[in-house]
Image (tube, coloured by chain):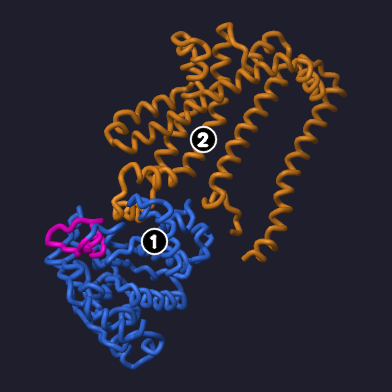
Amino acid sequence: MSAAQISSTVEASLTALAVSLRGVTKTYDNGVMALGPFDLTVRKGEFISLLGPSGCGKSTVLRIIAELSAPSSGSVRVARREGVPQPGHGIGFVFQEPTLMPWASVRENVRLPLRLGRVPKTEACARADAALASVGLADFADAFPRELSGGMKMRVSLARALVTDPDILLMDEPFAALDEITRFRLNNDLLALWRSLGKTVIFVTHSVFESVYLSQRVVVMTARPGRIQADIRIETVEPRGETFRTSAAYSDYCRKVSAALAPSYAEQSTL
Amino acid sequence: MNAQAMVTAKPSGAQGALRLVLPVIVFAAGLLAWELVVRFKEIPPYVLPAPSVIILTLIKDWAVLSQSLATTLLTTLEGFAAASVGGIALALLFNQSKWVEYSLFPYAIVLQVTPVIAIAPLLLIYLEQQTAVVVCAFIVAFFPVLSNTTLGLNSVDRNLAGLFQLYGASPRQTLRFLKLPAALPYILGGLRIAGGLSLIGAVVAEIAAGTAGAGSGLAYRIAESGYRLNIPRMFAALLLLSLAGIVIYGVLALVSHLVLRRWHESALGKES
């Protein structure tokens, strides 16, 4: 796919909304207000990053979008695919840990969402293998998670999130525990996947550099309770690559995002 | 990584051999000392039989002893099977309903902490003897299975549970694909303890039943031989009981290893 084609498909899909949060708050049972009020609009096909200090409720936003956690107030709208009911599931979730089942092979792990959705076995295995191939792990389908490196486990986790062909991919600091080289490679692979598959990606991170490198929009959050501090659009020549990572524009954006993030940390007296 | 494993395999292999050879040497030396002391001091067999005499008795009385061994093993197996099924089933029930757990768990503990030797005579009054013996084996063995399975079912990774929730897994799917596999190492640990305990339960109940004047298990043979001052046969029966316990433990440990070897830390070498 050429760069021109990519930008045109991205343009076309920018019109519809994928996720919309209005006045969402979350208060835990112990009375701690973790989030909000929080407003967020994500268009279809967009790659956005949520950036903020630890405990600002970034992960909570993802869990609310995935319906793993209910908001205390406010409204959440997640676009479902129109037309025929889709096989599988509309949302893929990648956790901070690989969160693989240690007792099952890589293929079984990737097949899990389809198995839970009662997709016939032969079809599910074929789709699991295709998802593994898309993250470059076609040869490791029969391996067990413990036999893989940290980066490979994360790829398996990504393949599992992609196997249902979701519209929205939620990623909760997925590469935080990896070394920098592995992280760069996975960042590039993720961008390539996003360009070819056209998913909506909401990516939680606490790394300024990662957020600027990956996303079209960086949403900077305040300390707890998390609200939006700044919403910064990153505009550059697509597709991004190592030239962008070393460009002056990149460091300008990083400076800008860091400046927006600074007050969030200043509010945290306990640091 | 493979090359490294090859290099480190050597010392660990030698150490493994040492761990096997040393106890055997100690055992042989002990037997030899025992044999020599009995021979030189001319200790009569009804006080302390020499190992050679015990082995001869074992061969001579094999017809009686083997039948007793079979009886005890059958009792143990029945008690173990009942404890495994009962313990796992009860743990699953507790996991499905807090109400059931709160209502019944205290009684499971009461059953566990009451010495089985004290319960056995009562059971022998109300139950047929063979049933009572099996029930004793069950009572002793079922608690570790119950508590270990409960622990395992509650040790599920929170994120994995979230993943199952995200993909709309039914309770049955969550149980089958998540909770049971996650609990498996714990269940197998419980079964390993239960195997030895059901033998103990069977022996205790047989001794209680034996004093009531019936039974033909190994423990009964020990009690009976004691009354008749047939000390060599006591030792021979004891030897068989020990061997039975070792074999039960070995088989369960092997099963556990075979089931878990591909993924669980407990079954993996230190290097991998």
Q: In the image, residue B103 lies at what x, y percent? A: 29, 29
Disc 1 crowd rating (10 Å Cα; few below 14, some 14-19, many 20+) is many
The blue-coloured chain is labelled A
- Spot occupied by residue B61 in the image (x, y as percentages of width and height): 75, 15
Question: Where is residue A25 shown, x and y percent of the image?
Answer: 15, 62
Find the residue positioned furthest to the top.
Answer: B213
Front position in the image: B51 or B215 = B215
Determine if the magenta segment contains residue B256: no
Chain on which label 1 sits:
A
Image quadrant holding the N terminus of chain A, namely bottom left
Residue that protrudes farthest toward the bottom in the picture = A248
Bin the neighbour count of mark 2 within 10 Å (Cα to Cα): few under 14, some 14-19, many 20 and up: many
Q: Residue A161 falls in which quadrant of the image?
A: bottom left
Q: Is residue A154 above or below residue B55?
A: below
Looking at the rendering, the stretch of residues picked out in magenta corresponds to A61-83
- Image quadrant containing the C terminus of chain A: bottom left
Residue A78 is inside the magenta segment: yes
Residue A51 showing in the rendered view: no
Tell me the residue at 62%/29% (across/down): B245
Closer to the camera in the image, B247 or A188:
A188
Q: Who is closer to the viewer here, A269 or A213?
A: A213
Residue B254 disc label: none
**Same subunit: marks 1 and 2:** no
Q: Residue furthest front?
A: A84
The nearer-to-camera label among 1 and 2 is 1
In the image, the chain rendered in orange is B
Name the residue tied to disc 1. Answer: A160
Q: Amino acid at mark 1?
A: Arg
Kind of residue sitting beneath label 2:
Leu
Residue located beneath label 2 in the image: B191
Residue drawn at point x = 47 percent, y = 34 percent: B144
- Helix, strand or loop at label 2? It is helix
